[in-house]
Amino acid sequence: MKKIKFPAIYIVIVISMLFITCILQSKPGLMPELYWTYFKAAALFALVFLVPLFNRKIRAIAQSVLKEEIRKKTLYVILFFMVLLVGIIHIFGKIAPGNQHIFVSELGLSGMTMFGLLFGIFMASTAIYKEMEKKTVYVMLSYPVSRQEIVMGKFIGNVISVTLFSCILSVVFILSLLLRFGFEKFELMLLYSCIGLMIEFMLIVAIAITTSTLLSTISNFIFVFIIFVLGHMTEQITHITGRLEADPIKSAGNMLLKIIPDFSRFEFKDMLNLGQTVDVNTLISSFGYALLYSAVMVSMGMLIFRKREVDRL
Amino acid sequence: MENVIEIKSLKKVYRDFWNRPKVVAVDGLDLSVRRGEIFGILGPNGSGKTTTLKLLLGLIFPSSGSIKIMGVSPENMECKKNIGYMPEESYLYGFLNADEILDFYGKLNAMPEKLRKKRIDEVLDLVGLTEARKRRVEDYSKGMSRRIGLAQVLLKDPELVLLDEPTIGLDPIGSREIKDIIKGLKDRGKTVLLSSHLLAEVQTICDRIAILYRGKLVEEGRVEDLLTVSNETEIITSGLKTGEVEKLKELVNKLGGNLISVGHPKETLESLFVKLIREKSGKDS
Ligand SMILES: Nc1ncnc2c1ncn2[C@@H]1O[C@H](COP(=O)(O)OP(=O)(O)OP(=O)(O)O)[C@@H](O)[C@H]1O
Ligand SMILES: [Mg+2]
């Protein structure tokens, strides 16, 4: 009997998850929504991060990605500016007296979003294409490493890096807020917002890695940026398609809405502003959504890269 | 003897974005490499040597024809443990140092940590990079990078070694060392397939060669046989004066000279190569 390979199982599980989610969405009440949310998040987390990390080759590749990103100077430039931004806001944030801290939090979160976008554009979106361009993948493929493992390793390495860096950023950011405004103004919502952004970054990385199996550096920059912008405009698109009469355009709009990632699930900036809160369940359901989306993306990346001729750029 | 590599009517057509054929890089190639030999692929620039190696590694896929490496297709991951590859230029992760690069490759080859550490020390010593092992490879000179490429192959210690122009970019001592290493591999029963256009080099180390021209096989065989001019005879004698050479054939014994060897004169690989390529390109144009 032929041994069933990990990527095949991975793809099958991802597709069945996607299928069940779609069914549950079209027939609410079939199963307690919350259970499925928890289950989906836990199962996908295991599938996307824990299981692959048992594979020492994936681990080695992820480790080297992390090493590269830590040693890259561009990242420190970005980080420096983000910290600077927070610092400036912190020092001069006297513009809106009264709810200054909200204003500052909002700006800080925007800064973090920028960081995620820049990371996605400059780091993740070149991950696999650069291996082909610099031809380092030639030697890598002369080892007993499958192409799927390469995609997986790059994905995990990049997610770990972006999470690590945004953790640092969050800590700096929250600490500086605490120092400035004291504990009584601190809201759990701020922490949730940071976590939400980290989840969003995972999704950006997944998209960027997948397209980097196909697109060259510059086109991928543009692609990731467009997805980022579109993903933040889901509300506007919904609004527009809702008012449309013409059927083909409307259904095209609805298609688009189904396909592009819905980043509004991870951004709680506006809610923070309005004084609203999210609960943990919302956060977990967003996490599940991002995991499923990422898993689908990575599966696609694996399928594309499997048949990719690495010297045809 | 068993064949480690078997290539049958292999063809590779590079296509452009619209899937229109652009270049026929390898055209109906038949080749087999036997276990334990050093096989050289020769050919002018752009004749398809690197493309053949890429096909052997499964980096690209044949347009038609088949490749078997140790009995399996190159897409089969399992055979990769026994293949070492040194690309035509060293493509390295600039942000790592020599130690880390080799450690990375060792991990990809599923070598246990202890063995990895020990072998890394050994191969770094073998390629003469022990001193520079903690420096980032982006600062390495060209020859030093090539040595890492070789170190990576030696670390793996595979049955089949594919070397794309192994001595390019190395100083004379370096290329001498590489040749010794290649011979050492053969002595240990490994199979080596190398591509080169440094003919003198190929002549000294290869057992068999194939000459490619525009993706087609022009000539193949043992170096010895190919370089032997069979319709001429060469006699090496001593103790004869120059005037007596013409009468030599019948008279050699009568004259009391010592007949040291009778054989066929050897062409140099260079003249053979130039002759074959000239013939071919003359025919084509
Ligand atoms: N990715 C590619 N896309 C299109 N054509 C290619 C590609 N790679 C190689 N070729 C073409 O295939 C032919 C063979 O190239 P190859 O690199 O195999 O030559 P080579 O024998 O290794 O030459 P050299 O001695 O210069 O290294 C050349 O005509 C080259 O232009
Ligand atoms: Mg070449």
Image (spheres, coloured by chain):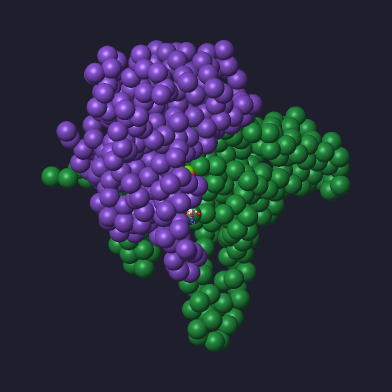
The x, y position of residue B253, in whole percent, is: 24, 19
Residue B43, picture quadrant: top left
Q: Which chain is green?
A: A
The x, y position of residue A28, in whole percent, is: 36, 64
Q: Is residue A242 left or right of residue B183?
A: right
At x 45% / y 31%, what residue is drawn?
A: B200
Which is more toward the observer, B216 or A145? B216
At x 48% / y 35%, what residue is drawn?
A: B198
Which is more toward the observer, B248 or B65? B248
The x, y position of residue B241, in whole percent, is: 40, 18
Q: Which chain is purple?
A: B
Q: Is residue A240 left or right of residue B76?
A: right
| Residue B253 to residue B277: above or below | above
How many numbered marks does the figure carry? 0
At x 28% / y 36%, what residue is drawn?
A: B225
Which is more toward the observer, A132 or A62? A132
Residue A29, picture quadrant: bottom left
| Residue A172 to residue A130: above or below | above
Q: Is residue A136 visible in the rendered structure shown here?
A: yes
At x 55% / y 36%, what residue is drawn?
A: A161
